[in-house]
Each structure stands twice: as C-alpha cells, then as structure tokens.
Image (cartoon, grey):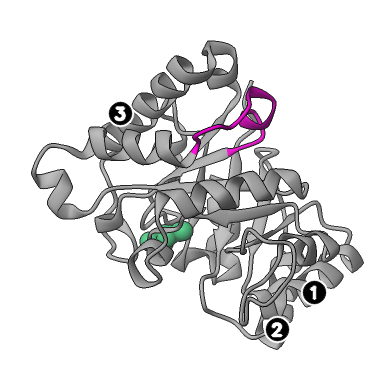
Amino acid sequence: MRVPFIAGNWKMNLTHLEAIAFLEQFHAKFENKNECEIAICPPFTALRSVKTVLDEQNMDVALGAQNMFYEQSGAYTGEVSPLMLKALEAEYVILGHSERREVFKETNQMVNQKIKSAFTNGLKPILCIGETLDIRESGKEEDFVLGQLEQCLEGLEIKDMVQITVAYEPIWAIGTGKTATVEDANGMCRAIRDKLSQLYGSETADAVRIQYGGSVKPGNISELMAASDIDGALVGGASLKAEDFLAIVNY
Ligand code: 13P
C-alpha cells in the first residue's frame, strides 16, 4: 500500500515572516483525515523558520527544499549544498522542476547528478518530469517523459529507487488553470510505473509514489486521487493558501 503523499511547492513565494503567518493559519485548522504524508517546500530563506514552527506546533509535516546543488561544498556562489539542507532537517528535495529546466537550463544529466547526491546525503528526491504543449500536441509525450525518467535515474540502485517520488507535471498544466484530464494524468503515471517496472522490477515499481502536479486545486484533487496510479500531488499556487492546501490534503 502506497501512503498518499501531498507536497506544497511554494516556488519563489512567501518571505520567512509570511511563512510563519501561513503556518499559524494552517495549524489552527489542521486535520489530516486521509492520513497522507504531507510536505511543505518553502524557499531556502524560509526553511529554518518553517521547521522551527512545525516542531513547535508538533505537526507531522515534513520539510522539503525546492532545489540543491550536487556538490557538498566549495566555490559555487549562490548555490545550496545537500549538507546544508540536511542540517536544517529537510527530508525531501524537489529536483528537475520544469521551471529549473526551462529558466535555469538544467539538463537530465544534472538532475541525475543531483538525485545521486541527494541519496548520498540522506535526502529523498521528488523528481519532476513532464512535457510541453508542443510535445503533447505532436503525440510524442510518452516517449519524451519516459526518456526524461530513464536519463534522470541512470545508474541508480534499487535500494534508492524505493525512496524516490516521481512527480508527473505536464508543463502546459502548470499555473495555467488547465489540469490534465484524470485519464491523461493517470495514463502517464501508469506508463511511468510500467517503465520503472521494466528498469527495477515490479516490486520496486509498485512501491514508488507518483504524484501529479499542474493546477491541482480543492475542486479537482479527489478525482485525481481516485485514479489507480496517482499517489499524491505536487501543488503550486493552491499550496500558498492555508485553507486551500488543507482542503487538498483532506480531499
Ligand atoms: P501549480 O499548482 O501552480 O499549477 O504548480 C504546479 C507545480 O509546478 C508544482 O511543482
């Protein structure tokens, strides 16, 4: 049985002070009736404050970062090391988000190095993959997404694989209000699981959690979660409002 996993990706939103205010509202109304695993992934500057408040509130919510570099230390101005995230007690790290691929030109090879480094340093990656609208319209979305998956996972061992979360985020559905249909989203999640089964065996593939991301809202989460191969959601915009994020967690 895969435990549902809902993570909020705040992207470049909320100062550490706004993050604390968010958590006050979140805590006041907190419930987790589906017994999901929940994670909040704030910007680097709010990680410490979010962790402190979650601990004070005694909330069973994990901390995640939105990116990291693959080296542990050194002359990499502006980068954040996995050791620094670990020291802040982050459990998860989002890697290969489409915004990092598009704006910061991250390649599958870099994402692969980051995934390996995350495991070496005791962090669990949330690997994002997904196609553009052009690719979907050309009908080649499955080849593209499975190609990303294979390249990002190259050289990874089975013992690590069970700790990974894959987030299928079609780029055309991110921040656009356009959600993929449940059939399309679940179809791709199933194709991802089949590929994992081919690469790592069915036991591993059955254990890996696959999230859907792209305009997830309180109004569409329950139909997504009812699908056979969608085990959770990576939520952007709707994770910035405590009430909406709680409604999503309690789908
Ligand atoms: P939205 O939920 O705002 O569409 O963002 C999705 C996303 O990119 C999460 O990582």
Q: Amino acid at mark 3?
A: Gly
Task: Tell whether label 1 touches label 2 (CB within 8 Å).
Answer: yes
Q: Residue at left 52%, top 12%?
A: 202
Q: Which one is earlier in the sequence, the residue at label 2 or at label 1?
A: 2
Query: Would residue 141 appear left or right of 63 to someone viewing this image?
Result: left
**How busy is the neighbourhood of tag 2: few (under 14 within 10 Å), some, or many (20 plus)?**
some
Residue 111 x, y percent position in the rendering: 50, 52
The amino acid beneath tag 2 is His
Judging depth in this view, the residue of 170 and 218 nearest the camera is: 170
Give the structural element (helix, strand or loop) at label 1.
Answer: helix
Total numbered circles: 3
Task: Give the image quarter of residue 162.
Answer: top right
Q: Position of residue 23 (x, y in %)?
A: 72, 72
Q: In this rendering, is residue 161 above or below 168?
A: above
View quadrant of ligand 1:
bottom left
Q: Which mark is residue 48?
A: 1
**181 to the left or right of 224:** left
Q: Which residues are magenta?
A: 153-164
**What residue appears at the point 45 percent right and 55 percent down from the top-left corner?**
218
Amino acid under disc 1: Arg
- Residue marked by disc 3: 187
